[in-house]
Image: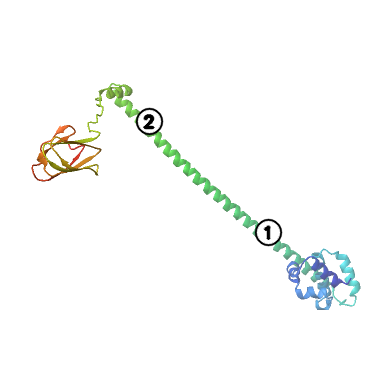
């Protein structure tokens, strides 16, 4: 296999583009293509050709001695007049390129280390701030608890002082005050449970009566007639000739409600008649 084909196949096998090789070796794409197409005359000077070829072979993990031997045996007629000074110059260029690659890698590593350090510092700063907040909250809770304890102690001391001033223990004083309270009489419900209205006829009287809003009686009450109405709340009546009827409210006789003119009257349980 020719050298150019070997370089190209190894590059493609590693998935490298010409630009990737240029960035890694600092060799221009123009000269990389010259190596892969074996147009070595494009590269100025034998020293540069050998230097570029070694750098490229080293990047592709190829054996340098084998590559150089095959190159020299296949290109004896290409620029054999290169001087020893040119070879040294090419070697220095190769060394410079290698040093530049190392320096770039070091700088990249340094930048990454700086970024990691800054990230660690930010993380620690966040943790410190969070710890400070928790510490402040705990101090606040401790202050509130202390204030409550002080208030309770002050209340206890004040209570003891007042008790000693009155020469009565707090418990005995409470019992004594409780004994002095007047007895509360039991509640007596004096309000009647129902309402009773009784009409007793002494003459002739037309009457209409409603019990709790419902029609209960309509007619004429004659002498000696008795009509009794029991209600839960109200008794309403309309008497046409009231002087001819005696009216009883819960068993108590009421004064005459009228004479000869029609009278309308409503009775309730709590009228206090």
Q: Which mark is residue 109?
A: 1
Q: Seen in the image, is 118 located left or right of residue 91?
A: left
Within the image, what quadrant is residue 179 found in? Answer: top left
Task: Give the mark count.
Answer: 2
The quarter of the picture where the C terminus appears is top left
| Image x and y of residue 117, in percent | 62, 54
Residue depicted at 83% across the width and 69% down the height: 9
Q: Relative to the observer, which residue lies in front, 141 or 240?
A: 240
| Image x and y of residue 265, in percent | 16, 43
Q: Seen in the image, is 247 located left or right of residue 10?
A: left
Q: Seen in the image, is 46 located left or right of residue 151?
A: right
Q: Secondary structure at mark 2?
A: helix
Q: Relative to the observer, which residue lies in front, 13 or 217?
A: 217
| Image x and y of residue 57, in percent | 82, 67
Above or below — where is 45 with respect to 181? below
Q: Which mark is residue 153?
A: 2
Residue depicted at 33% across the width and 23% down the height: 171
Q: Secondary structure at mark 1?
A: helix
- Give the colour scheme shown: rainbow
Within-10-Å neighbours for mark 2: few <14, some 14–19, many 20+: few
Q: Earlier in the sequence, mark 1 or mark 2?
A: 1
Above or below — where is 35 with respect to 58? below
Within the image, what quadrant is residue 186 found in? Answer: top left
Q: Which mark is residue 31?
A: none
Above or below — where is 79 with respect to 134? below
């Amino acid at each position: 296999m020719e050298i150019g084909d070997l370089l190209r196949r190894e590059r493609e096998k590693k998935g490298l583009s010409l630009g990737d090789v240029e960035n890694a070796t600092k060799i221009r794409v123009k000269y990389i293509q010259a190596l892969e197409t074996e147009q070595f005359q494009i590269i100025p000077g034998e020293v540069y050709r050998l230097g570029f070829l070694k750098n490229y072979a080293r990047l592709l993990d190829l054996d340098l001695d084998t590559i150089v031997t095959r190159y020299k045996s296949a290109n004896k007629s290409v620029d054999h007049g290169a001087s020893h000074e040119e070879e040294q110059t090419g070697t220095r260029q190769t060394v410079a390129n290698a040093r530049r690659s190392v320096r770039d890698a070091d700088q990249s590593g340094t930048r990454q280390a700086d970024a990691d350090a800054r990230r660690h510092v930010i993380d620690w700063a966040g943790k410190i701030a969070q710890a400070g907040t928790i510490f402040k909250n705990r101090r606040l809770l401790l202050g509130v608890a202390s204030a409550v304890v002080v208030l309770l102690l002050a209340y206890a001391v004040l209570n003891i002082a007042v008790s000693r001033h009155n020469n009565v223990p707090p418990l005995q004083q409470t019992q004594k005050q409780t004994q002095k309270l007047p007895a509360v009489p039991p509640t007596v419900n004096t309000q009647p449970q129902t309402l009773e209205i009784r009409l007793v006829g002494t003459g002739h009287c037309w009457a209409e009566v409603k019990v709790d809003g419902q029609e209960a009686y309509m007619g004429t009450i004659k002498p000696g007639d008795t009509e009794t109405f029991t209600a839960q709340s109200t008794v309403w009546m309309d008497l046409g000739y009231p002087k001819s009827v005696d009216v009883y409210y819960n068993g108590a006789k009421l004064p005459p409600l009228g004479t000869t003119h029609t009278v309308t009257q409503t009775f309730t349980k709590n009228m206090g008649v």
